[in-house]
Image: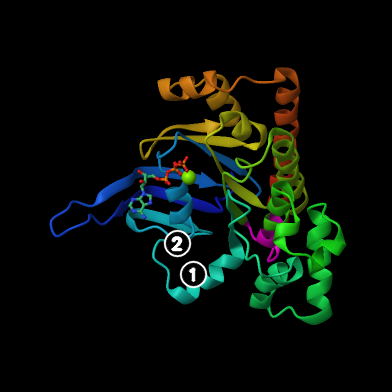
Amino acid sequence: MTESLLRVDDLEVAYPGRGMRAEPTRILHGVSLDIRPGETVGLVGESGSGKTTLGRAILGLAPVTGGTVTYRGEDISHPTRQRRRELTRDIQVVFQDPYTSMNPNLTIEQTLTEPLRVNGTKGSEARDRVASLLEAVHMPVDSMTRFPNEFSGGQRQRIAIARALALDPALIVCDEPVSALDLSNQRRVLDLFIEIQERTGVAYLFVSHDLAVVRHLSHRVAVLYRGEIVEWGDCDQVTARPEHPYTQRLLMAAPVPHPVRQAKHRADRQRVLAAQREADLQSGAA
Ligand SMILES: Nc1ncnc2c1ncn2[C@@H]1O[C@H](COP(=O)(O)OP(=O)(O)OP(=O)(O)O)[C@@H](O)[C@H]1O
Ligand SMILES: [Mg+2]
């Protein structure tokens, strides 16, 4: 069995209550899951179920009041500031709204160069890296000199993905990254996520309220309901034969557009992942 890249064990997140004697508000309780290298774990659930909070806890942005988050065997539930900064190399994020997640005053080149500074990458080396990042997300290299407002939502989301990839992270928390896009752009950006994963071996925690989206690219799926995981397992298992009534309801709201194509697609994805694991094991053994 492949070692987990990231584990969440019995996680509890609670925000302090307002006022002197107010009880803390528990948002997540008893949440456990793991993400393997190169894997996509889909996280679905209705609005307010705690999906963003779980992503934020992994990124160190939500108050962990119980349980642990472990990255490559290291407890990162309460890291120092310094360690948190270092971890941004390994764990990146793509947000839902491509309009607010980018500084409008920076050119695309500046936006993409910024994370590279962490590595001390400068000058022509940085320029080359920015060009290859843009290429990786199928954006023309002449986008470099332009500003975010000169691009569509779909294009901005590609740039946000390029920014997340800049430091070769092992994991990207994707919080509803296609929810603000129209259907045809959704599909293209989802396929881009898949393509990048197949090439780089990056893992995703892929958050969405839309089971159809999650089903398109996840290897395993967790269903969050009122701050607890009510279903967790292989994508096919969870999305085709859900056990929990809440998941069954979600599923009814998300019909499969092309059942045969989707099944083939998933089978292909599983093969790619198995091959990657095999390669990991071999390189680990060497
Ligand atoms: N900073 C905060 N302080 C207090 N409560 C918060 C805070 N952030 C989130 N919450 C509460 O935590 C709960 C879960 O919110 P969260 O944003 O994780 O849900 P979500 O599943 O991502 O929903 P959506 O699909 O609408 O994005 C909500 O009830 C929200 O009000
Ligand atoms: Mg959210």
| Residue 86 painted magenta | no
Is residue 182 in sight in this rendering?
yes
Residue 145, horizontal then vertical, whole percent: 81, 68
Q: Earlier in the sequence, mark 2 or mark 1?
A: 2
Q: Position of residue 242 (x, y in %)?
A: 49, 22
> Under tag 1, what secondary structure?
helix
The residue type indicated by label 2 comes to Gly
SS under mark 2: loop
Q: Answer few, some or many: residues within 10 Å of disc 2's Cα (few below 14, many 20 plus, some between 14 and 19).
A: some
Residue at (52%, 35%) from the top-left corner? 209
Residue at which label 1 appears: 84
Say whether residue 201 is visible: no
Q: Nearer the viewer, residue 149 or 240?
A: 149
Badges 2 and 1: C-beta atoms under 8 Å apart?
A: yes
**Alpha-carbon span between mark 2 and mark 1:** 7 Å
Q: Choose between 41 and 1: the one closer to the eye.
A: 41
Q: Residue at x 78, y 53 (%)?
A: 137
> The magenta stretch spans which residues?
161-170
Q: Is residue 127 above or below residue 248?
A: below
Q: Quadrant of the C terminus?
A: bottom right
Residue 240 relative to residue 265: left or right: left
Q: How many numbered tags mark residues here?
A: 2
Q: Is 106 situated above or below 4?
A: below
> Which residue position is annotated with label 2?
60
Q: Residue at x 42, y 50 (%)?
A: 53
Question: Measured from the top left, where is residue 253 in percent x and y?
Answer: 54, 21
Which residue in the rendered view is the most extreme toward the front? Answer: 149
Q: Which mark is residue 266?
A: none
**Colour logic:** rainbow
Residue 125, percent across and down? 82, 77
Callout 1, which amino acid?
Arg
Please name the residue shown 61% across and 48% down the image: 204
